[in-house]
Amino acid sequence: MQWIMLVLLLSACSQSYMVSDNLAYPYNLPPIGSKLVVTERVAIEPGTTRTFLQRGRPMSLGDFDRYRANCNFEVAKLSDEVQQIEPDTFVIKRVQRMTTEVVRSQDHRPRFIAAEFDPSSPIVTHGYHLWLSSEKQPDVMRVTCRGAFDDLSRAEPPSIDEIREALGGIVELVLAT
């Protein structure tokens, strides 16, 4: 397990972006300077700082399919009222790789899914934090996009095509050249 963590840590240090012209390749990161163009107002429910998008539809944390690519907007401030992300162009100023492991109980079964693929392999999702900049909406911090949950050996981050599918017509990803 220590070797896996070391490999993940060292691979996170590299910042190669476009390693292929194939936008379906899961290891192409959106280049810094790319833009997210929000074309429709996006609501963030009271008492949370995030709203999820999957297949071009807004969703809550409990509603999206964790076995398909998804993205979420995140704002800096928690509010008791609905927050709105207005149509705007956000510049991607930093791209950060991320991995999330499913929390396991002492009996080593995932808490929110019924079946396990390999009891020795953690269930993870790989993805990217896209840190954003906007003069009009500085409270909008980032968009996080994740691939499907899977065994560690099979999990992949979302491809640019999958990110675009998750964002749908609500947000357009325009790659920097």
Image (cartoon, helix red, strand yellow):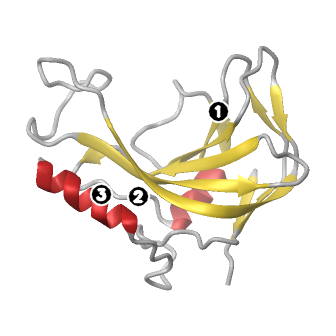
Do residues under tags 3 and 2 come within 8 Å of each other at their CB atoms?
A: no
- Determine the CA span between mark 3 and mark 2: 15 Å
Q: Which residue is mark 1?
A: 50
Q: Nearer the viewer, residue 138 or 143?
A: 138
Mark 2: few/some/many CA within 10 Å (<14, 14-19, 20+): many
Q: On residue 9, which mark appears?
A: 3
- Closer to the observer: label 3 or label 2? 3
Q: Is residue 84 above or below residue 78?
A: below
Which of the 4 quarters of the picture holds residue 51?
A: top right
Residue positioned most to the top = 80
Q: On residue 149, which mark appears?
A: none
Q: On residue 157, which mark appears?
A: 2
Instruction: Say whether disc 3 or disc 2 marks the residue closer to the N-terminus.
Output: 3
Instruction: Say whether disc 3 or disc 1 marks the residue closer to the N-terminus.
Output: 3
**Quadrant position of the C terminus in the picture:** bottom right
Q: Is residue 134 above or below residue 65?
A: below
